[in-house]
Image: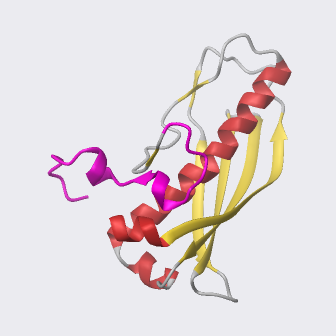
């Protein structure tokens, strides 16, 4: 997994389709966001993958916040179709893309809350259960900032 972490790099992150109308949201209630992630290789280069993450906060009647983020990731020496066929590497690449995309969504959500004048931050349940932890102050997704779950907890015994 360490070799995989060293071979991946984030090329760019693009945010589009951002919507918010959170002025009337009950910020004291626990909100369960809807998050989807799709990863596909690009036609031009099988070592370049595009992950599309959609994040939405809504209740039964209204959408309060929504954004779509595209994460472009480069693999040095490995085809993403091969990486996606092995469960462990698929989970790792999905977690990396999700963490990058959710970082953008979180920033936009905090900005929207500040603009709406919410005195209390929104309570979000289970936005990302990350396999990857970025080092404090690390804003780059290059491998020197990534640590795998095994490195975070070397005594871990489960084989997810």
In this view, the residue in front, 4 or 158, is 4
Q: Residue at x 57, y 83 (%)?
A: 47
Image quarter for residue 86?
bottom left
Would residue 66 be visible to someone looking at this image? Answer: yes
Q: Residue at x 59, y 49 (%)?
A: 35
In this view, the residue in front, 61 or 152, is 152
What's the colour scheme?
secondary structure
Residue 153 percent across, percent down from the top left: 24, 44
In the rendered view, would you say 82 is above or below 38? below
Residue 134 percent across, percent down from the top left: 48, 45
Q: Is residue 64 left or right of residue 80?
A: right
Image quarter for residue 115?
top right
Image quarter for residue 39?
bottom right
Q: Is residue 98 magenta?
A: no
In the rendered view, would you say 109 is above or below 37? above
Residue 19 percent across, percent down from the top left: 83, 42
**Magenta-highlighted stretch: main secondary structure?**
loop
Q: Is residue 147 magenta?
A: yes
Q: Residue at x 84, y 31 (%)?
A: 21
Q: How many marks?
A: 0
Quadrant that contains the N terminus: bottom left
Region in magenta:
136-160
Would residue 90 be visible to someone looking at this image? Answer: no
Residue 94 percent across, percent down from the top left: 49, 62
């Amino acid at each position: 997994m360490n070799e995989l972490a060293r071979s991946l790099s984030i090329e760019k992150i693009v945010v589009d389709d951002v919507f918010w109308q959170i002025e009337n949201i009950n910020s004291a209630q626990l909100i369960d966001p809807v998050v989807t992630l799709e990863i596909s290789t690009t036609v031009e280069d099988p070592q370049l993958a595009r992950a599309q993450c959609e994040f939405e906060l809504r209740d039964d009647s209204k959408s309060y916040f929504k954004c779509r983020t595209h994460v472009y990731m480069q693999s040095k020496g490995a085809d993403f179709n091969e990486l996606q066929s092995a469960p462990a590497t698929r989970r790792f690449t999905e977690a990396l893309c999700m963490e990058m995309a959710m970082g953008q969504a979180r920033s936009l959500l905090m900005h929207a809350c500040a603009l709406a004048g919410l005195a209390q931050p929104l309570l979000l349940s289970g936005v990302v259960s990350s396999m990857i932890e970025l080092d404090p102050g690390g804003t780059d997704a290059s491998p020197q900032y990534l640590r795998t779950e095994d490195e975070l907890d070397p005594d871990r015994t489960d084989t997810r």
